[in-house]
Image: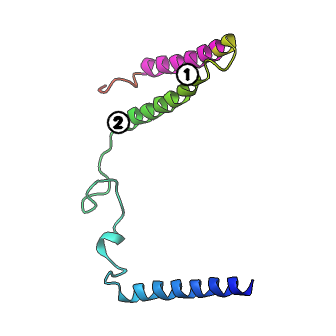
Amino acid sequence: MILMMMISMITIIISNILMLFSMIISKKSFKDREKCSPFECGFDPKSSARNPFSLHFFLITVIFLIFDVEIALIFPMIFTFKMVNLMIWMKTSLFFMIILLIGLYHEWNQNMLNWTN
């Protein structure tokens, strides 16, 4: 037990010494201009931070993500087809598909799927 504690203490001390040594000889400064500037998702940080962003593009992206998750939920239904009762499988699959179609109809009715208004 004492040997394990000694080995772990030696490992911790050596790793701390190496980290301290690497910080001392590092050429990077802590006040780098790029590190201090905010990250703006690909926009040029030297220009105005209030670049116009299309809200419609954001909504299309959210709709895509929702349908992507729905597809991920449909895949297990294919694999469970032979393992469960056919009537229960059909009822749950039909119920899930009806919910998806109602959501699609609502998005279509609200003109969310049109790229231009």
Q: Which residue is mark 1?
A: 78
| Image position of 53 (left or right of 84) | left
Q: Would you place residue 19 above or below residue 87 in this image? A: below
* Residue 77 percent coordinates (x, y): 58, 23
Secondary structure of residue under mark 2: helix
The residue closer to the viewer here, 34 or 111, is 34
Q: Residue 99 lies in magenta, yes or no?
A: yes
Q: Quadrant of residue 45?
A: bottom left
Q: Considering the image in quadrants, where does the C terminus appear?
A: top left
Q: Considering the image in quadrants, where does the N terminus appear?
A: bottom right
Badge 1 amino acid: Ile
Q: Residues within 10 Å of mark 2 (few under 14, many from 20)?
A: few
- The range drawn in magenta is 90-110
* Residue 109 percent coordinates (x, y): 44, 17
* Residue 50 percent coordinates (x, y): 32, 53
For the residues labelled 1 and 2, say whether their Cβ atoms are less than 8 Å apart.
Answer: no
| Image position of 44 (left or right of 2) | left
Q: Which residue is mark 2?
A: 57
